[in-house]
Image: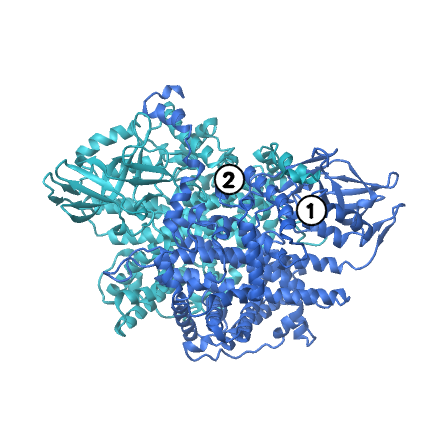
Chain colours: A blue, B cyan
């Protein structure tokens, strides 16, 4: 181990192993997780070592190979889909595996299909007698589902649906696993019966032969080409031309077309709606938080190994983490990773509770859960993406090498701001809920628990008297609450004013959207700070964990104020003198947390193989690793460029060209 | 042309062609530029159409091919290095060409070499009898040049220098064109004579044979492997083991080692120092501004073609540029592109003037020019990189496809935040200059022109009385000035207080660096706003150009206030009520500029080939282009994955694995 890194570990103020267990949800979970990681990483089939050298085609092939081999591995290890190991497999593979949409295919049948459909298709899918996908997004249509253009016309004569993508913009575009792998997909299309449109419905469509994988009649499909990341996934396109499918292939738990063409709606779709909402929360852990934690691990370990310039004259060059500016880049990201880990745990619990209520036909929590999942998906993906980028840049030139692992983390996490609902649209959905609740609260009506604070508008001023007061969770949580209420109330007032002045409702809404987005963000930020503070309070006081988590909670809160001083200063709730105290406390905290920075990333417990980074390894041997790894690059094989171009140039025989 | 795009052009409030000429510096320059673009783009050798499908090896080979062929092309076209066409060639190639470091090699010899050295090496390089590179950065050492570890020991017996990279961290790392192409390079090494170290000096070292391109004795060199972009460049590594070079190979304009080992320093290095400073400004136009302009063109054209969701019930889906949130993402980037175009022109003129003064041995302007080039390089690269990312995200899923062109623009421009001086370090250099000037100004001493405002600290309050007042350049420029002075003065006070309280000077400096960076940014932001306002004032009042530029200037200024409200509110210079006026004016401006958004990007005058984007073409045929282009992707060729993995899975014959 590099001595500069080793020395950082000797002074940890807390037990790293205990913090790891806390993050995992108990020592037993840590043990199970490590077992899965060890089994996956010791198997060369799952190696990611060559990943940064591979073409899109090679990445795809490796991901398919891993997905197929994983079936065997699970069998050999005795892992099942309901076992405690299952949730760690994807993380251990760093998501570098195919057939993720196969699972979405299965879930959509389970949720939207009739009992008969489930009985027919789920066993086929479980046994991999087909490979499924999920075809919703179109070339010209994303978030606004009502705008989808693919059609499914019921033909009473043959009892079939006839599917078409009538225009190029109607082509299905983006579905994963569909470009090259899938044999079947669930297609969302506008249902027409007797010339009448009944809106969007799901249909199971076979697209490739189960015998030789050739495209089925009427199907045009392929891969949409290179993307910023996800090279391992065959995101695809799909054109349908008079594709006939049996009438029984419309997923019919909630709606049915009878043989005579009668359309029947049955049951409540609310559970389905809720399922879609929960997906937003379920992706956060593996796809969003883990990348930020990895980026922090890489950048912080590198920052105590890299020495640059002198902090004190006459001494050796300083570790770059000893510079205040470097601390100010990285340590807030570390605090953010912890803050979001805890809010994510909170949301997961809330959604489990919501699920139980909904199964008991109590749908009261639905609007609140929808607003929370939208707002937090947007906030967490936004902050984590920005955080990974900051970590990348903070590593200078070496961060820019793919071998650092940081570019791939960034280009992948960036997609999370777009998929499962584009962030701006999600924040506006949260804002719509908040406006409604604010109005209700103002009128004295009851509102859901997470927004009761909107009713209790306190005017007053921040009571802090010195910089230490800003290390009091009550002080800063209340400041966040105040800002959230103020932004919501001022935007609601603007909206009302516009409408009363004669602006049409939808125009007025549009003219308030920039501020509505701000208000929705402030709401989520407040809840995240409050939740972190409450979590810290409940932690065991032993092993130093509560103390360091308290520091991180303070840093998370004060970083948010320091980065958005305007909203806190605006109405004088926080004075300029108090803002200077915030700055002082914030900068003081950086120096405090810096001492534990390496133990705090060690606690994330990533193996070297899972980081796949020349800068982030546990032993800190950065330069050897970069050099040895670079030598293996295909760019170090002989290039034909010399014979073809350089030699004629240097030998002055350019006429060959 | 897509009718949704065509309609945007019919209502332009100004002459697009006249604005293009203004940006180019006159209609004649536009004509010359278009000639170069036409000649390059009509030649299939320079095509970039397959770029997004190519491997790093293919990109490198294509770039070498283009560089070699360019010699012929220039000859055929009658273009010379001193001709008016020359500066447009690189832009027309979108930088996708090799041997850029060959030019740096030549410039370093011209600037650092003796007359004899220039006479020997420059003709060889000009005629491409060698390929040069420039080896400064090491694996363990970047910005802090004194820390470089490569050594050059003078051997009086043989009159040679013996070069070594004594440790792995001393290995040269990153030099472009060096990994696979270069035959020679300028190596920066610590000079030792008779055991005494004289610091960093430049040496010409041959690294590959001119006959067969094999590595010279003692040389280990290769490619550093995959990066986030720059796949076409062979950034390289270089190990030197007892490499002997003739004594005459030390570049000796400023320093010389006599045969007996006497070290002689001669002349002033200040011109050299200035040359390095100007490089920071010279990269901005092609490497930083052009990418932002391209990203704006792509995202804004796409945003009037893409329709999503309904703005008004009953109407067709709305163009996404009609949503306030989309305007608030894109239009400030457009204003930024124009603001930076004008500040860049201003800086180029200032540096030309500086160059003339320096040649007359007047070095007075040097510190100011150094501070300006550092601060603006950091500010412009930072804002443009963020702007390109915003454009990418604003295009949703399609922005994430490489075929949009946006991911490549982003991953390339990101490097500009790191190369030619890491931004945080540069801002601290600017801050050091500002602190010095602030102290001098406070003591009544004269200071350079760009910082005289620091002396004239005005307290007072912002005089704006209604939202229209914030469309007055005097009002907002003064607000920016006030903030810049306040941040500088408060940070200077903190620094003084710390030192007076006994904190050592370097520790005190480090404890102020987060705030020093803020102050340096505020200084540059103020100058950029002031310069934009002054430029608008001087524009011709005809053809509507002044009017639309005034709107953009206002937007640039108000966006900066809206995004940093805290620093304007802090000391009460701007009141909360005034900040609400800023917000109102800012949001109003978005709706005004939105009407001219497409003409404003058309004026950048990018051809479809130079944009290389399925989303940004002049005709707006987004969906056709995406579909046709995707079909050409290598991922649409037959994959062996089916036979190898999918077939055994589907046919249940997994035992083959």
Q: Is residue A187 visible?
A: no
**Picture layout, residue A150 above or below residue B494:** above
Q: Which residue is mark 2?
A: A54
Q: Which of the two marks, 2 or 1, is nearer to us in this view?
A: 2
> Which residue does the image show at 54% across and 52% down from the upper left?
A413
Mark with earlier residue (2, 1): 2
Q: Residues within 10 Å of mark 2 (few under 14, many from 20)?
A: some
Q: CA distance from mark 2 to mark 1?
A: 27 Å
Residue A98 horizontal/vertical position (percent): 61, 45
Residue B184 horizontal/vertical position (percent): 29, 34
Q: Quadrant of residue A423?
A: bottom right
Q: Which residue is mark 1?
A: A134
Name the secondary structure under disc 1: strand
Q: Chain of mark 2?
A: A
Name the secondary structure under disc 2: loop
> Which residue does the image show at 45% across and 75% down from the upper left?
A470
Residue A592 versus residue B632: which sits nearer the camera?
A592
Residue B233 versus residue A624: which sits nearer the camera?
A624
Say left or right for B533 vs A117.
Answer: left
Q: Chain of mark 1?
A: A
């Amino acid at each position: 181990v590099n001595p500069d890194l080793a020395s950082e570990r000797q002074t940890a103020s807390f037990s790293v192993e205990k913090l790891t267990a806390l993050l995992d949800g108990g020592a037993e979970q840590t043990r199970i997780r490590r077992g899965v990681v060890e089994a996956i990483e010791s198997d060369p089939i799952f190696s990611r070592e060559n990943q940064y050298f591979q073409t899109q085609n090679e990445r795809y092939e490796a991901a398919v190979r891993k997905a197929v081999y994983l079936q065997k591995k699970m069998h050999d290890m005795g892992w099942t889909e309901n076992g405690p190991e299952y949730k760690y497999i994807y993380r251990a593979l760093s998501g570098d595996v195919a057939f993720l949409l196969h699972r979405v295919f299965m879930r959509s049948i389970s949720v939207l299909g009739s009992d008969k459909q489930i009985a027919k298709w789920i066993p086929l899918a479980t046994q991999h007698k087909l490979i499924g996908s999920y075809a919703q997004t179109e070339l010209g249509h994303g978030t606004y589902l009502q705008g989808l253009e693919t059609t499914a016309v019921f033909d009473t004569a043959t009892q079939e649906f006839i599917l078409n993508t009538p225009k190029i913009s109607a082509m299905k575009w983006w579905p994963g696993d569909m470009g090259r792998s899938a044999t079947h997909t669930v297609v969302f299309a506008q249902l027409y019966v007797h010339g009448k449109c009944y809106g969007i419905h799901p249909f199971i469509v076979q697209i490739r032969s189960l015998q030789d994988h050739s495209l089925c009649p009427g199907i045009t499909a392929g891969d949409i080409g290179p993307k910023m990341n996800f090279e391992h996934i065959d995101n695809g396109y799909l054109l349908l031309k008079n594709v006939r499918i049996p009438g029984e292939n419309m997923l019919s738990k909630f709606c049915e077309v009878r043989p005579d063409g009668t359309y029947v709606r049955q049951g409540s779709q609310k559970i389905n709606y809720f399922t879609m909402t929960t997906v937003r929360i379920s992706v956060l852990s593996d796809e969003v938080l883990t990348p930020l934690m990895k980026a922090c691990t890489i950048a912080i370990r590198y920052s105590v190994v890299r020495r640059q310039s002198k902090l004190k004259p006459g001494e050796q060059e300083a570790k770059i983490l000893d510079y205040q500016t470097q601390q100010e880049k990285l340590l807030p990201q570390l605090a953010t990773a912890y803050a979001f880990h805890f809010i994510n745990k909170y949301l997961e619990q809330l959604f489990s509770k919501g699920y139980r209520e909904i199964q008991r036909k109590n749908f009261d929590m639905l609007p609140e859960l929808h607003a929370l999942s939208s707002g937090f998906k947007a906030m967490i993906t936004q902050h984590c993406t920005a955080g990974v980028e900051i970590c990348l840049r903070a590593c200078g030139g070496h961060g820019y090498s793919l071998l650092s692992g940081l570019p791939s983390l960034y280009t992948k996490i960036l997609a999370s701001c777009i998929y499962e609902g584009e962030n701006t649209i999600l924040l506006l959905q949260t804002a719509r809920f908040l406006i409604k609740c604010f109005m209700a609260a103002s009128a004295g009506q009851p509102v859901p628990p997470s927004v009761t604070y909107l009713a209790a508008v306190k005017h007053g001023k921040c009571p802090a008297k010195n910089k230490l007061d800003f290390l009091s969770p009550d002080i800063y949580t209340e400041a966040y609450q105040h800002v959230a209420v103020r932004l919501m109330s001022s935007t609601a007032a603007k909206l009302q004013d516009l409408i009363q002045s004669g602006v049409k409702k939808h125009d007025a809404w549009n003219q308030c959207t920039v501020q509505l987005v701000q208000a929705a963000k402030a709401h989520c930020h407040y809840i995240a700070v409050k939740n972190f503070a409450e979590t810290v309070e409940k932690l065991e006081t032993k092993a130093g964990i509560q103390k360091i988590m308290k520091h991180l909670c303070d840093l998370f809160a004060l970083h948010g104020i320091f980065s958005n001083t305007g909203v806190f200063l605006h109405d004088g709730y926080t004075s300029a003198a108090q803002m200077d105290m915030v700055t002082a406390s914030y900068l003081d905290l950086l120096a405090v947390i810096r001492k534990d920075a390496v133990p705090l990333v060690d606690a994330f417990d990533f193996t070297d193989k899972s980081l796949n980074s020349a800068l982030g390894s546990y032993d800190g041997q950065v330069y050897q690793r970069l050099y040895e790894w670079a030598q293996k690059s295909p760019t170090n094989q002989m290039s034909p460029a010399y014979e073809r171009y350089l030699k004629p140039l240097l030998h002055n025989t350019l006429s060959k060209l």
